[in-house]
Image (cartoon, rainbow, N blue to C red):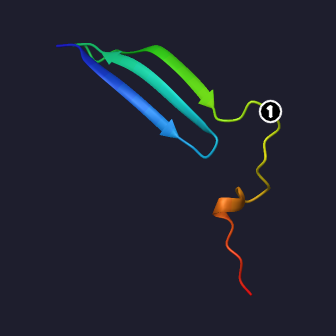
Amino acid sequence: MMRYIAGIDIGNSSTEVALATLNEAGALTITHSGAATAFAGPYPQRAGGNDRDQRHVA
């Protein structure tokens, strides 16, 4: 029986996906992969994350 495997990595500014098949003999074949980013221009993040992720201590 062939199995289908999907791997998804959702990050802060991008999402990556990989699709694979695993056959009866145990051979893994990556069939598709792709990446998408949320930003079209210069990245607004600073080192350490974006403004929403920042924690300030008085």
Going by the image, does 14 lie left or right of 43?
A: left
Going by the image, does 27 lie left or right of 40?
A: left
Q: Residue furthest right?
A: 42
Q: Which residue is mark 1?
A: 41
Q: Nearer the viewer, residue 18 or 14?
A: 14
Image quarter in which the N terminus is found: top left
Residue pictured at 64% horizontal, 41% vertical: 13
Image quarter in which the C terminus is found: bottom right
Q: Residue furthest bottom?
A: 58
Q: Where 33 falls versus 14 (above or below)? A: above
Q: Nearer the viewer, residue 2 or 38?
A: 38
Residue pictured at 41% horizontal, 20% vertical: 19
Tag 1: Cα neighbours inside 10 Å, few (<14), some, or many (≥20)?
few
- Identify the element where label 1 is drawn: loop
Q: Where 11 falls versus 56 (above or below)? A: above
Going by the image, does 36 lie left or right of 54?
A: left
Q: Position of residue 18 (x, y in %)?
A: 46, 24
Residue pictured at 79% horizontal, 55% vertical: 46
